[in-house]
Amino acid sequence: MLPLLELIIAIEVGTVIGGLAVWGLFLLGSVVGMTVVRRQGVAAWRALTSSVRSGTPPSRDLADATILILAGLLFTFPGFVTDVAALLLVLPFTRPLARRPLERYFRRAAADQVSMRSAYVNRVQFGPGAPGAPGAPGAPGATGPTAGAPGRFGAGFGRDDVIQGEVVDEGDGRP
């Protein structure tokens, strides 16, 4: 749908300003887009490394850089609709509309990473299944089929439990 819309608009604009001018605008948009992507990619990397060093979540800087990289990518696609969308992402007074959801996403992702790392450190420190290790059977907050159960085979089954059964052969070669 978007390529068709872009084509229709390009044809309409081309009838007014000429086909060569439309191609020139597309080329200019691509050059601007590549420049924005390159500059903001470097800025995003710097923001990420500095926030990792300082131990703070890089939510705002990383969100801004991500938005500007997206805008640069939209500029590189030939078309006027994508260029207008990119322009809306580049302008400082419209960027916060896209930044807020990204900031929330980056904060949640950072919090998840912290909780995953602490769980990993506790697991390495205590060992898998050790009392007090996160997710260990019987540990506070343990969930899943082995919560509160000995062993690792599910609720109520340990290594020493024996389950008796019978194998039935249907006679047609199927187990």
Image (cartoon, rainbow, N blue to C red):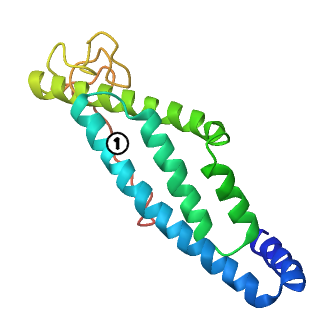
Q: Residue at x 66, y 39 (%)?
A: 93
Q: Is residue 62 left or right of 56 when viewed as pictured?
A: right
Closer to us: 109 or 175: 109
Q: Amino acid at mark 1?
A: Ala
Q: Where is the C terminus found, in terms of image quarters? A: bottom left
- Expressed as whole percent of the image width and height from the top left, the position of residue 100 reads 58, 33
- Expressed as whole percent of the image width and height from the top left, the position of residue 148 reads 30, 14
**View extreme (bottom): residue:** 20
Q: Residue at x 45, y 57 (%)?
A: 170
User: Is residue 100 depicted above or below 142 in this figure?
Assistant: below
Q: Which residue is mark 1?
A: 47
Residue 152 seen in this snapshot: no
**Displayed quadrant of residue 25:** bottom right
User: Is residue 24 depicted above or below 77 in this figure?
Assistant: below
**Secondary structure beneath label 1:** helix
Q: Where is the N terminus found, in terms of image quarters? A: bottom right
Q: Is residue 23 left or right of 119 when viewed as pictured?
A: right
Q: Is residue 98 left or right of 140 when viewed as pictured?
A: right
- Expressed as whole percent of the image width and height from the top left, the position of residue 88 reads 68, 51
- Expressed as whole percent of the image width and height from the top left, the position of residue 62 reads 43, 42
User: Is residue 56 depicted above or below 93 in this figure?
Assistant: above
**View extreme (top): residue:** 140
Q: Residue at x 24, y 20 (%)?
A: 136
User: Is residue 124 depicted above or below 3 in this figure?
Assistant: above
Residue 81 seen in this snapshot: yes
Closer to us: 168 or 46: 46
Closer to us: 55 or 61: 61
Number of labels in the image equals: 1
Q: Residue at x 33, y 33 (%)?
A: 113
**Displayed quadrant of residue 119:** top left
Q: Crowdedness of circle 1 by 10 Å Cα count: few (<14), some, many (20+)?
A: some
